[in-house]
Image (cartoon, rainbow, N blue to C red):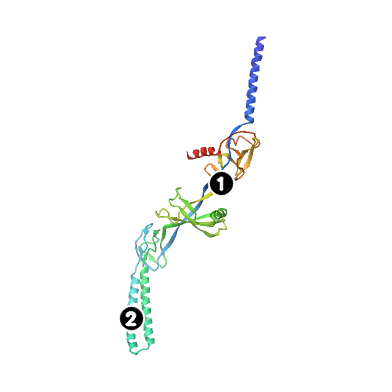
Amino acid sequence: MKMVTKLSIVLGLIATLVLSGCQKHETHEEMPHYAATTPFREDTSILEPYVCQIRAIRHIEVRSLEKGYLTHIFIDEGQWVKKGQPMFKIMPNVYQAELLTAEAEAQNMNIEYLNTKALADKNIVSPNELALAKAKLDKANAQVNLAKTHLGFTDIRAPFDGITDHLAVRIGSLLDEDDLLTELSDIAHLWVYFNVPEAKYLDFIRREKGKTNEKVQLRMANGEIYDHTGVIETIVGDFYNTSGNIQFRALFENPDRVLRHGQTGTILMTVPYPNAMLIPQKATFEIMDKIYLYVVNKEEKVEQRLLQIEAELPHMFIVKSGVNDGERILIEGMRKVSPGDKVMIDLKPPQEVRSELMKLYTE
């Protein structure tokens, strides 16, 4: 009888402990505990990237102006040349002969003119004959100048300081008039073109009030930021109908000749967001390419909100709509809760959350 009593007492205690454990487990499941925070506001900015094309302000084709054999090449590909520096020379023999012929004819016309003038001074010939002799002399002198010009065209010099491209000819080439010899680029200053969507263009015009002197940065193809800051100089007149973009042009100094005509890169334009609403990215989740978060209402229940994101910062979103100032948002447990669930939260100040995220970002 005593053994039955003891056994009953033991079983009773076990049952009590089991029921107690189940009640605690049920309570834990009903009221989970998660970290939360609130949106905060501050003045911030982002760097908007735009693919760009780099162009020399002066980029020309150097072509032959006369026919003949190429006798000399004074430059090499990729060489920096100064204005007036010799670049090519075409065989001048024919043009030198033409100049000598023209000079001899001019000398003959000069003698004829002087004889006619002497006769005209004695009234032996009419003034018309003197005028005709003068016209012949002027024509002969013009032929001399023309022959000198043609001879000068055989000596091709750099029209400005710049860097040469590929050589399209070799010594001994038989050139025709207007044959391509090389290309020359003035890269001391460079124009950088980039396309901006219509909506961003309108934001820019509203923000800058029509001015086009905003400073921009250039990220080169290797990912590094170019040492010199550029300035937006102008916006072209028309939009591209096919893409809905309009082209901006920025000016960059290039004293070290790092940049070349034809390069590509990425323009980084600073876009300010005054009094922007910020939330941690970790508070959001994505469904069908749309971004949501969970808000804990006054009844401590979870609400799902659709967000409109304006821009993205490291570990933060700039929010356009979907959440209000002061609302409590979950920053953990998003996969464990559903809309309508009741939760308990550990509310953290937004700056503390941001500091933790930035520390993680720097690490």
The spot of residue 185 in percent (x, y) is 42, 59
* Direction bottom: furthest residue: 124
**Residue 110 tag number:** 2
The location of residue 200, given as percent across then percent down, is 55, 53
Above or below, 112 relative to 297 = below
The picture places residue 118, in percent across and down from the top left corner, at 32, 86
Left or right: residue 75 versus residue 287 is left
Specify whether 99 is left or right of 42: left
In this rendering, is residue 326 above or below 159?
Answer: above
Whole-angstrom CA distance, mark 2 to mark 1, is 86 Å
Residue beneath disc 1: 275
Residue under the image location 49 percent in, 38 percent down: 359
Q: Hey, what amino acid is under mark 2?
A: Asn
Residue at the image position 51 percent from the left and 38 percent from the top:
355
Residue 307, image quadrant: top right
Q: Is residue 132 above or below residue 19?
A: below
As drawn, which residue projects farthest toward the top? 1
Amino acid tagged 1: Asn
Q: Nearer the viewer, residue 105 or 56?
A: 56
* Residue at the spot 55% in from the left edge and 48% down from the top edge: 274
Label 2 neighbourhood size at 10 Å, few (<14), some (14-19), many (20+)? some
Determine the secondary structure under disc 1: strand
